[in-house]
Image (cartoon, grey):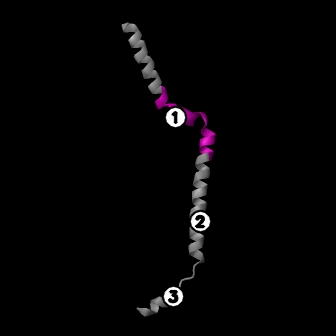
């Protein structure tokens, strides 16, 4: 009975350990796909920021307000 419970505890410990490393293992196995996803995300963020900056550059600034001071 004691041996059986120790085996069950060991099995539970192994399962928990495997669950903790599941994300790490998926990253290591699919490194190229994860890298591609990451680069695509960065590129989309850069494009979004570039669009915002382009909109700001297109706006005309009225310089007459400086004459008020």
For label 3, the residue is 63
Quadrant that contains the N terminus: top left
For label 1, the residue is 24
Q: Check disc 2: other Cα within 10 Å, few if <14, some if 14-19, many if 20+.
A: few
Q: Is residue 4 above or below residue 35?
A: above
Extreme residue in the left direction: 2
Percent position of residue 29, x then y: 60, 33
Q: Residue at x 42, y 22 (%)?
A: 13
- Quick one: label 3 or label 2, which is nearer the N terminus? 2
Q: Is residue 62 above or below residue 13?
A: below
The magenta-colored residue range is 18-36
Q: Assign the magenta stretch its main secondary structure.
A: helix
Q: Residue at x 58, y 75 (%)?
A: 57
- Locate residue 20 relative to residue 30 in the image: left or right: left
In the image shown, does 59 or 11 lie closer to the viewer? 11
Q: Is residue 52 magenta?
A: no
For label 2, the residue is 50
Figure quadrant of residue 60: bottom right
Extreme residue in the front direction: 1
Q: Check disc 3: other Cα within 10 Å, few if <14, some if 14-19, many if 20+.
A: few
Percent position of residue 41, x then y: 58, 52
Q: Residue at x 57, y 58 (%)?
A: 45
- Locate residue 31 relative to residue 9 in the image: left or right: right
């Amino acid at each position: 009975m004691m041996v059986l419970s120790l085996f069950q505890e060991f099995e539970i410990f192994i399962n928990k350990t495997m669950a903790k490393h599941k994300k790490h293992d998926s990253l290591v196995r699919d490194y190229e796909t994860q890298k591609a996803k990451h680069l695509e995300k960065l590129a989309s963020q850069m494009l979004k920021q570039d669009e915002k900056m382009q909109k700001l550059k297109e706006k005309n600034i009225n310089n007459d307000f400086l004459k008020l001071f």
